[in-house]
Image (tube, grey):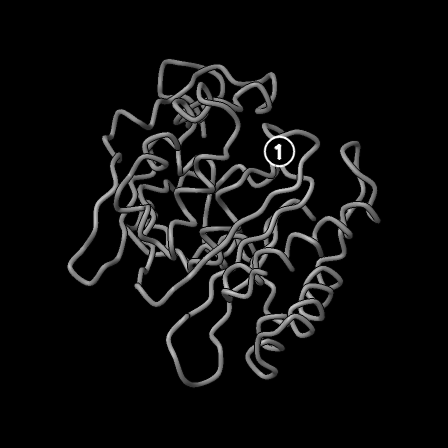
Amino acid sequence: MRAHAGSPGTALYISGGTILVHAGATIDTAVDLCAIGARGVSTEPDGTIVIGACTPVAELARSGEAAVAAGGILSRAAHGVANHTIRNLATVGGNLVAWHFPTDLPPVFLALDAVMRVHTSDGAKDVTLDAFYTRRREVFRRGDLITGVRVPSSSALRGAFHKVGRKRLDVAIASAAAVVNASDGGAPDVRLALGGLRVAPLRARDAESYLTENGLDAATIRKAAVIAVDAASPRGDRRATADYRRAAAVAAAVRVLTEAAGLEG
């Protein structure tokens, strides 16, 4: 965005500001979004969890409301983001838009079917996180602001998240999040999301369909993990080769699907 009248140069929206150093050297003004007060975690009567975009990751990790989402997957992922200092500064909204920096929350929100509340020059609208990562230029324009995230919640959902990094505090070489509807009867309702493999996190739709059609057991889970990672075509970079990232992603996907399905051991 351009700086306001009388202040030549370029301005940048920030919330926690933890990755401002990556924004480039042409920023003249920083606009603090947290002044709008979009902070906190609450639950609506239907069980939907509402999270303000400026909520620090540390606050999300401590939230009792977040702890009930799919068996606590959201809280566990938030606890694993970087270190205590960064979690107190980094915000939920910033975590979602920093897709070039493979952090932990986006795959979890994808697997939870999260919806972002976006304020535009034409008013407010809801954008699914899936659409944001696959069709960003269509659904999110320059100047739009994310003010909150809505997460559908049900006691029938079980979730799991796993990250592979060079060390515990590192960003992900590969990560996976899975959510399974644990209610009895019918075909399994499975959601699987992967992070760290390409620029943006992604839902593994083909793998989800395979599991819905074939059920959840050790063999189908392994096959689904391979389907998901092959479709993502993992890249190589300074953190890992493409082959290592592929192997790590398959292992992570198997682990979270097994845990979310209740098949551990």
3 and 212: which is toward the camera: 212
Q: Residue at x 53, y 37 (%)?
A: 98
- The amino acid beneath tag 1 is Val
Q: Residue at x 39, y 80 (%)?
A: 184
Q: Quadrant of the N terminus?
A: top left
Task: Tell me where residue 138 appears, x and y as whole percent.
Answer: 50, 56
Please tell me whether residue 151 is drawn above or below residue 142 in the rendered image. Answer: below
Please tell me whether residue 183 is drawn above or below residue 251 in the rendered image. Answer: below
- Relative to 262, is 127 on the left or the right? left
Task: Tell me where residue 150 appears, x and y as whole percent.
Answer: 31, 53
As drawn, the residue found furthest toward the front would be 265
Which residue lies under the disc numbered 1?
171
Label 1, residues with CA under 10 Å away: few <14, some 14-19, many ≥20: many
State the image quarter where residue 135 is shown.
bottom right
153 and 235: which is toward the camera: 153
Q: Residue at x 32, y 46 (%)?
A: 66
Task: Tell me where residue 257 appears, x and y as whole percent.
Answer: 57, 62
As drawn, the residue found furthest toward the left would be 45
The kind of secondary structure element at disc 1 is loop
Task: Tell me where residue 103 appears, x and y as whole percent.
Answer: 55, 38
Q: Residue at x 61, y 30 (%)?
A: 168
- Relative to 30, is 194 on the left or the right? right
